[in-house]
Image (spheres, helix red, strand yellow):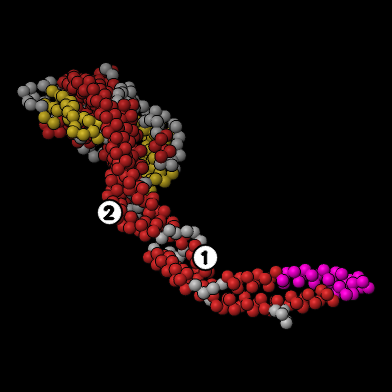
Amino acid sequence: MLKSLYIQNFVLIDSLDIQFENGFSVITGETGAGKSIILGALGLVLGQRADGKSIQKGSDKCVIEAIFDVSKYQLEPFFIENDLEYDSDTCILRRELFSSGKSRAFVNDSPVGLGILKELGTRLIDIHSQHQNLLLGNTHFQLKVVDVMAENEILLIMYKKEFSRYMGLKRELKELEAKAAQTKQEEDYLRFQLGQLEEAELNAGEQEELEQEQEALAHAEEIKGALYKISQLLDGEESGCVQLLKEALSTAGSIDRYYPKAKEIAERIRSAYLDMNDLASDADSQKEDVEFNPGRLDWVNDRLNLLYTLEQKHRVSSIEELIAIRDDCHKQLEEINSFDEQIAELNRLISVSYQELLQQAAVLSAQRQVAAQRISEELVRMVTPLGMPNARFQVEVSPKEEPDADGLDLVRFMFSGNKNGDLQPVEQTASGGEISRLMLCIKAMIAGFTALPTIIFDEVDTGVSGDIADKMGSIMRRLGEKMQVFAITHLPQIASKGKAHYYVYKQDLEEKTVTRIKRLTKEERIKEIARMLSGSSLTEASLANARDLLSDN
């Protein structure tokens, strides 16, 4: 509920700070006093767009702040979703406008965009005006009314969850089919690539080994000559170091009897002799193994050319990367081969989900049919005393071809205000006054089934008077027993029904005229209702009539 409203420097309002209470309250005042200005300020703090022209002349900044009791609205998910500080009892909306045309919006002192402010505002206040009566012809609004009366909240949550799953599966199928079609076009090319790579019989590390072998084969004669020279230098008959070491070993042995250290020298020479002898033998042996093999060299060159060609084609620089490309081709072709199975499985899941949707939609439809009949009967009963004795109203629930986010039902409100008139869509046949009364009754009817935001009826009583106005006032008063309700009215019959009465008026100051609002005392209220009855001249009769109206309530 709206607890208080603070307005500073907005149009004709220099400063306004007023407290409100729960129940049914009425707002009255002479035409042009500024009731629409207060509604305009409230609209701004609820997210409507504005410009610098709304700021009072001579001011640079306008501030509007509304404080709400949100203890019954279960708004925590909204605050969490939008990363806002949540207070389970109080919510403060503030809007600041600047003469430059810029504006700022805040929720609980956290800056927010107008979209968030507007969305939150719709959950806190419902300003019901002639313009909003157009909602009555909106099929989504009509369906919402039926679902509220049918108490379908839990069923709808379950249905929407399944519908979301169903649509997700369909999107997944569409994406998979597109991917399958695209990869099918690439299948031949992938198979050609894979064939080339598999035919190459690639082995990790092979390229490095072949490049080493190529070098060896290309320099076979040079290698063979070098190994022969090494063999001769080590073990040649005349100057080989093996023979020299053998002679040095014999010499060391000739003095070991009288020079003990010669034994150590001999051992070291013997070790070197054995190593050089082995090395000479290995060099000679390897020399015999090396031979010029043109055939093998041609094969190595051809093999390396194949590998280089494949690397160049695939824009890589190693055989390991070619192997990775080969494996990826394998993977893609396996995926292509599995598309049919995946698509078949998705189609099966979609079919199962669709059947579940139809079952849940059937339950919703049954609930809606019962609620539609109840709404039709209850609404006629409520509007008949409101100057619509021949009103006929019917909620038609017809099936759609395919389920959507709301189910399988198309809801239309059908109406006739004449005894013999054909039922037609309400937006095509009902007058503005009839729509206002229908909307009033609908909101009074659904208030017992859901927590509605604060409702402000802005001259919803236009075109009615007398007993009808009295009955409309009674409906608003009963609605106020369930929630906070405001009525901006010119009718004393409605004004007398309010639990609280606020009066909007203009005050002339030395330099300007400003709009004020105050809550009336009991005596002030009697005079205001008397004024509404008889005009500006108060008479004893009008005062007595005002007292009677108030005493009846």
Q: Which residue is mark 2?
A: 185
* Label of residue 209 in the image: 1
Could you say where residue 474 lies in the image, as x and y percent from the top left? 25, 21
Please, which residue is most extreme toward the right here?
Answer: 258
Could you say where residue 89 lies in the image, as x and y percent from the top left? 44, 31
Residue ID at (68%, 73%): 280
Tell me the kind of residue under disc 2: Gln
Residue ID at (27%, 33%): 351
Please, which residue is most extreme toward the top here?
Answer: 552
Q: Nearer the viewer, mark 2 or mark 1?
A: 1
Tell me if residue 255 is in the magenta stretch: yes
Give the main secondary structure of the magenta stretch.
Answer: helix
Q: Nearer the viewer, residue 166 or 267?
A: 267
Q: Nearer the viewer, residue 129 or 452?
A: 452
Q: Name which of mark 2 and mark 1 comes first in the sequence.
A: 2
Residue 360 appears anywhere in the view:
yes
Instruction: Work out whether 446 lies above or below 281.
Output: above
Please, which residue is most extreme toward the front here?
Answer: 237
Could you say where residue 68 lies in the image, as x and y percent from the top left? 39, 34
Residue ID at (39%, 63%): 314
Q: Quadrant of the C terminus?
A: top left
- Within 10 angstroms of label 2, few (less than 14), some, or many (20 or more) residues? few
- As measured in the structure, the alpha-carbon distance from the residue carrying label 2 to the one carrying label 1 is 38 Å
Please, which residue is most extreme toward the left here?
Answer: 420
Residue 524 appears anywhere in the view:
no
Where does the magenta region start and end? 252-277
Could you say where residue 156 lies in the image, as x and y percent from the top left? 30, 29
Q: Quadrant of the N terminus?
A: top left
**38 horizontally vs 417: left or right:** right
Name the secondary structure under disc 1: helix
Residue ID at (43%, 41%): 84
